Amino acid sequence: MPNDTLTPAAPAWQAQALCAETGADFFFPEPGSSVREAKRICAMCDMRPACLEYALEHDERFGVWGGLSEKERLTLRRTSR
Ligand code: SF4
């Protein structure tokens, strides 16, 4: 998950997140825009498992987290119940 303003309360994995270097724009595209670039970056990010777990635990509804779009996380939540 992109985080331009890391705070002391931010999870430790966010300090090593690739998206912290690229900025948030790719990860929160306008509705209907491609998430391909965000996913490409996520695929290279070592923090992907922790990021996805965090997003699912905190019910993050917007943006690309852990390489999954909003719709993909929703599907994952529904199928893992
Ligand atoms: S998996 Fe993607 S969204 Fe998550 S920290 Fe890495 S680059 Fe950011």
Image (spheres, grey):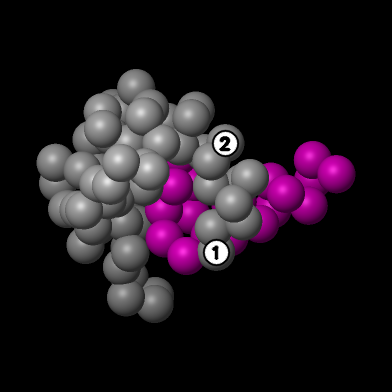
What x and y, as percent, mark residue 15? 26, 32
Q: Is residue 40 visible?
A: no
Viewer-nearest residue: 69 or 18: 18
Question: In the image, is residue 23 above or below residue 11?
Answer: below
Q: Answer with left or right where residue 38 lies relative to residue 58.
A: left
Q: Amino acid at mark 1?
A: Arg
What x and y, as percent, mark residue 66? 45, 39
Is 14 a magenta residue?
A: no
What x and y, as percent, mark residue 49? 49, 28
Could you tell me which quadrant the C terminus lies in? top right
What x and y, as percent, mark residue 18? 23, 35
Residue ID at (41%, 36%): 11
Q: Answer with left or right where residue 61 lies relative to residue 38.
A: right
Q: Secondary structure at mark 1?
A: loop
Q: Which residue is mark 1?
A: 61
Q: Which mark is residue 46?
A: none
Q: Is residue 28 visible?
A: yes
Q: Amino acid at mark 2?
A: Glu
Q: Which residue is mark 2?
A: 53
Please state the total of marks drawn on the protein image. Answer: 2
Furthest residue toward front = 8
Question: In the image, is residue 63 above or below residue 19?
Answer: below
Is 68 a magenta residue?
A: yes
Gap between marks 2 and 1 measured at Cα: 13 Å
Q: Which residues are magenta?
A: 62-81
Residue ID at (59%, 51%): 58
